[in-house]
Amino acid sequence: MVTSYYKLPLDTFRIIKNKEIDDCELKESIVNFIHLITTSYFGECSFDESFGCSIWNVDFDNLTSTNKLRNTITESLLDSLVAQEKRLKRIHIDVNIKQEEFKNRGALNRIKKRIDIKVEGVVSQTNEPFFCVESFYIAPLSF
């Protein structure tokens, strides 16, 4: 049974120098993995084309309704987490989408969609409840 998990981002310089790298607890590792899934697009990992989620597919989609966008992201992320994150069970995802206005120094203001993703579940190994929140802006993606 694995008892240590690596903290992200990985310090590759320390790995190359054959030095110890920072580790983290199980729940933090799961949060980091969820972040990796949400920030990866399908096909980005050449060894696993199914790793990622569809946020990137809808990044500049301003025509789709908020409900359809929410459903697309929820289904995609749930499918990816069930397939990829085996340390969680009974996963539930809630996606909330809001528009926020950013004031610029010039006359034009920008409006971006903010996506708040709440992931709940149970840690398989310990049966402890799990909860995390990811927030992103899309068009273009930023966090």
Image: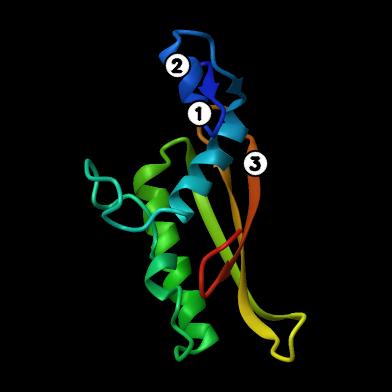
Q: Position of residue 74 (x, y in %)?
A: 48, 67
- Residue 72 lies, with reference to residue 29, above or below; the image says below
As measured in the structure, the alpha-carbon distance from the residue carrying label 2 to the one carrying label 3 is 33 Å
Q: Position of residue 77 (x, y in %)?
A: 44, 59
Total tally of numbered discs in the picture: 3
Instruction: Classify residue 43 by image quadrant.
Output: bottom left
For the residue pair 17 and 123, the one nearer the viewer reads as 17
Whether residue 37 sits left or right of residue 134 in the image: it is left
Residue at 51% x, 47% y is 34
Helix, strand or loop under label 2? helix
Helix, strand or loop under label 1? loop
**Is the C terminus in the top left, top right, bottom left or bottom right quadrant?**
bottom right
**Is the N terminus in the top left, top right, bottom left or bottom right quadrant?**
top left
Instruction: Classify residue 112 by image quadrant.
Output: bottom right
**Residue flagged by tag 3: what amino acid is it?**
Pro
| Image mark for residue 10 | 1
Tag 1–tag 2 contact (CB < 8 Å): yes
Whether residue 50 sits left or right of residue 74 in the image: it is left
Q: Confirm whether residue 17 shows in the render.
A: yes
Q: Which residue is mark 3?
A: 129
Helix, strand or loop under label 3? strand
For the residue pair 136 and 31, the one nearer the viewer reads as 136
Residue at 51% x, 52% y is 91
Crowd band around label 2 with a 10 angstrom C-alpha radius: few (<14), some (14–19), many (20+) = few
Residue at 40% x, 53% y is 40
| Image mark for residue 15 | 2
- Residue 143 lies, with reference to residue 34, above or below; the image says below
Reading the chain from its start, which is encountered first: label 1 or label 2? Answer: 1
**Residue flagged by tag 2: what amino acid is it?**
Ile
Q: Nearer the viewer, mark 2 or mark 3?
A: 2
- Residue 50 lies, with reference to residue 26, above or below; the image says below
